[in-house]
Image: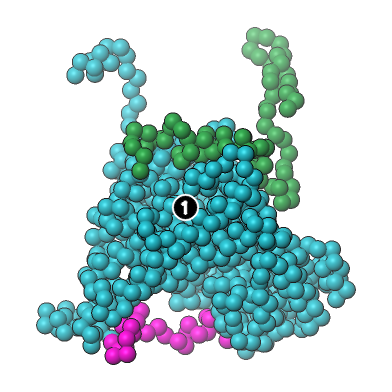
Chain colours: A green, B cyan
Amino acid sequence: MEYKIEKKSAPGRDEVEVLGATYEEGKPEGEELGKWRQKLRDRNEKLKYLQTGERYWYGKDWYGSEKRKNPA
Amino acid sequence: MAEAETKSIDNASIKMIDKAASDGVNTAFDRAETKKPCPIGVEGSCCKHCGMGPCRVPPPKGRQETPEEKQKRRGVCGATAETIAARNFIRMIAGGAAAHSDHGRGVAEVFLAVAKGEAPGYEIKDEQKLLQLALDWGVDIGDRSNQEIAINIGEIALAEFGKQEGQVLFLNRAPLKRQELWRREGAAPRGIDREIVEIMHRTHIGVDQDYRNLLRQGVRASIADGWGGSMIATELQDIIFGTPAPVLGRINLGVLSRDEVNLIIHGHEPLLSEMVVVAAQDPEMIALAKSKGANGINIAGMCCTANEILMRHGIPLAGNFLQQELAIVTGAVEAMVVDVQCIMQSLTAVAECYHTKIITTSPKAKIPGAIHIQFDEHNAMESARAIVKTAIENFPNRGSNIDIPKEQTDLVAGFSHETINYLLGGIYRASYRPLNDNIINGRIRGVAGVVGCNNARVKHNEAHTTMVKELIKNDVLVLQTGCSAIASAEAGLMTPEAASKYAGEGLASVCEAVGIPPVLHLGSCVDNSRILIAATAMVKEGGLGDDISELPVAGAAPEWMSEKAISIGQYFVGSGVFTVFGVNWPTLDSEEVSKYLFEDFEAIYGGMWAFEPDPIKAAHLMIDHIDKKRQALGIDKARERVLFDMAMRRELEGA
């Protein structure tokens, strides 16, 4: 990703350069609109996401409110 | 117009009810007027399970019955009114669970064929969901191909239906406390088919005659539906068609096109409809349509099939259950292709008044007067092309009596559990934490699942939209599926802008920050399993108790009519959710059975049923329950935040 530098005025100084927004600009169109799962490119990333994003079921060391309990 | 306005709140439907009347077409709205429900059957007091009956055992109306009268209120076999009411109730569960689960079985069969390369046209679209199921079911992943993994998953999924021992595998996804409760109460299903068959056995004359024992089996079979058959359907469909993500769609009869071939896909299973969508995009088919004088091919969905193709492809949705006949009344539908569930037999009679062809596709669901083009997963594209071609060739037969209502509304659909989790935190921080935090801080009061059907006994869509508006006004986030979701979408409640227009200040602020509507579309009726998973994620995230029954959540089906709705309601109750149904209630003639379902269930399952036909009152029953749970969690009042200094900490430690 290319970082954008924005110029902003700062108190007591002239304009300063700051790092701009890093989100993906634009509006996806067509059938791809809103689809996010393709951002996970390969099997390793998908498995890693399951362990972190879906940690409630697949995390190895963190079960939220059930962390202290024995597995069912 | 005045009379039609008493039958629906939806302007497009009102116009078509009027058009049907002037065209001399008989619809469900007319039949509901002339065909009154049986007053004894509607409250569960009629038993027709053997040749000595039917036996009717209603209580005396307008006065308290004496103990002697109650003692005599039995069928010929001696079954009490309680046994009869409980039998009828759990047979409804069996019917609903069978419908959802047989849908799941059909998907599993196609899934296995896809995995084996025997179903051309289908593919594994969501590898991540495939891996997820492999982790759930202990299937080795390693360096194996997706096909190899999928074969194992397909075989395990199919085995779930006929399993005799142990427990349904997806039960392991539920909160640990809930799993323990199910096992303790004998409510953990062993296999999906087994629990449904056991209901049919227990409700045969002279078998189970303890209403509590009958209702326990009802819970077990319903859990086999929600955490079994329905969940298998949802998960396997996600693998072969893609896990839904937010998609912009359009809804209501106004999506039909005046100058294109209109093909409506109606029913529940996405197996064929996915292929019809692809076939309709084939340049050869489009050229054929143009050769017949049409500008193209317009696919629109109806009922739950519509929800499936809407949330995966953004295909427009023409309407819900009570709009199926009205779509044909427009005079602009070349063909309506149906598979299973919620399809009115009267479609062929309505179609006779216009040029519409009704096409059945399932060997399980044929209708006299319809064309039958059998769906074969091994040759699905050929079936799909035959259907699209039938519609195209019917375009020149379109008459001049065409009136397509202008009404159509935008909606955002496709909020699977996975997408909610992603939207709340992104790829690197996917989490339910923001939801739980906003429930704890009170911006969101609680979460409600409002689902279910339309029912011609009440004004079309009114109870759904009234209830949902009342809930979001009171800062309750609403999750929806099925025809209920369609009703809210038609009322404009499923766009992000609806938050500022209809939601309370707290809920609106969260919706605006995340960019979601206050009413989330989670899919079709088998996708109620997504709501179970979302509730489980809320529990597991922490801060809102250790079980679904401790969450500030509630469920409702204000316009229910199908046995599937009863099964859905029962698995929500059995999972710990307070659930309110409207219209009527099938055990009202038995005070004991109703009390057991409405009150005693809470002590056993943490969730219980309620019946309230007034949608505002029902919404407030849900809100009261949510408030009760908030109080139990200690999050009902804003707490003063005190920054402890060292002296205060030492004092605390010394105490």
Location of residue B447 with respect to A56 vertically, above or below: below
Q: Which residue is mark 1?
A: B531
Left or right of B30? Residue B403 is right
User: Percent from the top left, x then y, of residue A64?
Assistant: 41, 35
**Residue B286 in sight in this render:** yes
- The total number of labels drawn is 1
* x, y percent for residue B25: 61, 86
- Residue B126 sits above or below residue B584 on the image: above
Highlighted range, magenta: B26-55
Q: Residue at x 65, y 83 (%)?
A: B370
State the residue at coordinates (42%, 60%).
B163
Q: Residue furthest top?
A: A12
Q: Who is closer to the viewer here, B446 or B379?
A: B379
Image position, residue B414 (x, y; %) = 59, 52
From where the camera sits, is residue B350 visible?
no
Q: Is residue B338 magenta?
A: no
Q: Nearer the viewer, residue B483 or B117?
A: B117
Q: Secondary structure at mark 1?
A: helix
Compared with residue B363, is residue B448 higher up or lower down, i.e. above or below? Answer: above
Determine which quarter of the picture holds residue B304: bottom right
Residue type highlighted by circle 1: Ile
Is residue B524 rendered to the left or right of residue A5?
Answer: left
| Position in image of residue A19 (x %, y %) | 69, 20
Magenta stretch holds residue B32 = yes
Bin the neighbour count of mark 1 within 10 Å (Cα to Cα): few under 14, some 14-19, many 20 and up: many
Say which residue appears at 28% left-offset and 81% top-offset. B205
Q: In what quadrant of the picture does the N terminus of chain A appear?
A: top right
Q: Return the residue nearer the eye: B494 or B98.
A: B98
Tell me: residue B453, above or below residue B128: below
Task: Point out the image quarter for the C terminus of chain A.
Answer: top left
The residue depicted at 38 percent of the width and 71 percent of the height is B197
Which chain's residue wears label 1? B
